[in-house]
Amino acid sequence: MSTQAVEPHNDANRVKIFDTTLRDGEQSPGITLNTREKLEIAHQLRRLGVDIIEAGFPITSPGDFEAVRAISQEVPDVVIAALARANEKDVTIAGEAVRESAQGRIHTFIATSDIHLEYKLRMTRDRVLEAAANAVRLARTIVDDVEFSCEDATRSDPAYVAEVVGAAIAEGATTINLPDTVGYTMPNEFQRFLLEIYERCPELRNVTLSLHCHNDLGLAVANSLAGIEVGARQIEGCVNGIGERAGNASVEEIAMILRTRAADLGGLWCGIETTEITRASRLVSRLTGYAIQPNKAIVGRNAFAHEAGIHQHGVLSNPLTYEIMDAQSVGLAHNEIVLGKHSGRHALDHALQELGYELDRDELNAAFARFKDIADLKGRLSGVDLEALVNDELRVESGSSFLLDSLSVATRTDAAPEATVVVADPDGAHHTGSGTGDGPVNALMHAIDDAIGSSGVLLEYQVSAVTGGTDALGEARVVCEIGGRSYAGQGVSTDVLEATAVAYLRAIDASRRAGHGERVMAGGV
C-alpha cells in the first residue's frame, strides 16, 4: 500500500475543486452568515486553493446578492460562481452578481427526474429541455463560463439526461454537473450511470464533467471518487462536509485522498494547499456554529490522537505504524504565536497577518480593544485564541446588531435563577430587562426577551473550550426558533454565560435581517 503522494505532471489528471460551502453549506438549518463572514471564508478558500467558489444563490435574497457581488469584487485568482434556476430572472441576476469578477461563472440548473417534474416543477420533459437550453443560451451572452446541472440526475432516465446534457452543451455550457441530489446512489451504479451518459452523449467528453454528491447514506466521498475514476474532473463539496440534510462531499477528505492515494488513482491530483485545511475547517466551524465531530476524518480532534498504549508506542517508534498522513500536512503544526497583556498593537497586527488576516485600521482597532480586554483576564493568548476572537468580531455587522452592555446572573440551589441584562439596540439606545427560568441560560434568554421584545425558543445549545486549560476561552452556540424559523448564533468570551447571551443576541440579529428581505426558498442541486 502506497501512502506517498505522487508529484503531479499531467494536467489531464487534475481534478478541479468546486467549493459550495457558501451556497449549499449555508443552506444547512440554522446557518446564517453575514457578508463579512462570507468574505472571510471566501478569502480562506482562496488560500486553500479551491478552483471555484460558489458564492451563493443571488435570487434568494438581497443579502445573498450583495454577498456574491462583494466576493466577486474582492476575492481574486479564483472562479466565482453564482447559482441560478433555469429561468431568465435567475440567470440575469446571477450574471449581475458575478459581473465584477475576473472569472465569473453562472451555474444554472433544473431537475430532470420524473418525480421532480411531476410534483415540484409540474413541467413536461419537453418544457424542461427547452428551459435548460434557453437558460444556458442566455447565460452565455453574459459570461463565457457556464455550468449546467441536471438536478436529481441519478434518479432520472439516462436517455433523457443525455438529451438535456446534449442540448446544454450545444448552447455553450462549459461544465456539466450530474449530481446525486438525494444521496441515494451506490458507487458502482453511479459509475454505470456516468458511462451510459458518456455513451449516449459523446459531446460530454469535450467539456468538464462535474459531480455534486450528497451524504444521506454516507457515500458522498465514495461516489465522488467513483465518478472521477471514469472521467469526471470537477468535484463539488463543502468544508467539513456541511450542507443540506446529511451534507455534501467533504472537500478536505477528497483532497487528502487524492494526495495520499495518488499512485493508486492513476495520478489524479488537485491544487489544494493541504496545510490550509485545518484553518479552513476551524473558520467554517466557528462562523457557521456547526461543531466538528471528534472522530471526523482529517479535521476531527481525534484524527491524529492515539489513546491505546500499543498505538502510542508504535507511533513514537514510527508514525507510519498508525498514521497514514502527517499531521503537519493538514496544517496541524504547533502554533508558536503567543501574545500577552503587554503586547502592543503592532505585535497583534503582525500575529494576525501571520494567521492570514488583513484588517483595516478600524478593524484592527476593534480587534486590539477586544484583545486587551481578554488578555487582562486570561493573561496569554495563543494563535487559536486570536483566530476565535477575530472570527467573533466578524459576526458584528455595523449599525445592525444588538450588543450586550452588561449582565448579572444569580443562581441558588433553592430558588429559580434570575438574570438582568442591559442591551444596546442598533440605534445606540440601551434597554434593561430581567427574567427567571429553570436554569441560568433560560433566565438569560427571558431577560433579553424582556429588554428588546424578542421571543425565542431554544432548540440547541452547545458550549466548548477554544483551547485547553482552565483559563480557556468559552465558545457558545445556540439554535433558536424565532418567528417559526430556526436561527443560529455564536459568541466567544472568558465567561460562558456572557458568550451565551451574545450568541442569543446574534440569533435575534439573524432573524431580523432575514425579515428585512423575503428569502426565496429555491432549493438547489
Image: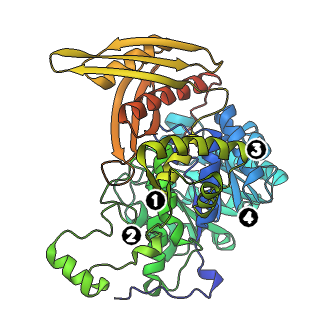
Give the residue at x 81% y 49%: 99
The amino acid type found where label 4 is placed reads Asp
The amino acid type found where label 1 is placed reads Ala
Q: Which residue is disc 3 drawn over?
A: 97
Foreground disc of the pair 1, 2: 1
Q: Are marks 4 and 3 in contact (CB under 8 Å)?
A: no
Instruction: Mark 3 or mark 1: name the one nearer the start of the chain.
Output: 3
* Circle 1 Cα neighbour tier, 10 Å, few/some/many (<14 / 14–19 / ≥20): many
Spatial separation of the CA atoms under disc 1 and disc 2: 17 Å
Specify whether 100 is left or right of 409. Answer: right
Q: Which residue is disc 2 drawn over?
A: 188
**Where does residue 342 sit, x and y in percent of width and height?**
54, 52
Q: Secondary structure at mark 1?
A: loop
Instruction: Mark 4 or mark 3: name the one nearer the start of the chain.
Output: 4
Give the residue at x 70% y 45%: 68
Q: Which residue is disc 4 drawn over?
A: 77
Spatial separation of the CA atoms under disc 4 and disc 3: 17 Å
**Residue 455: mark in rendering:** none
Q: Nearer the viewer, residue 494 or 193?
A: 494
Spatial separation of the CA atoms under disc 2 and disc 4: 36 Å
Spatial separation of the CA atoms under disc 1 and disc 4: 24 Å
Q: Which residue is disc 1 drawn over?
A: 249
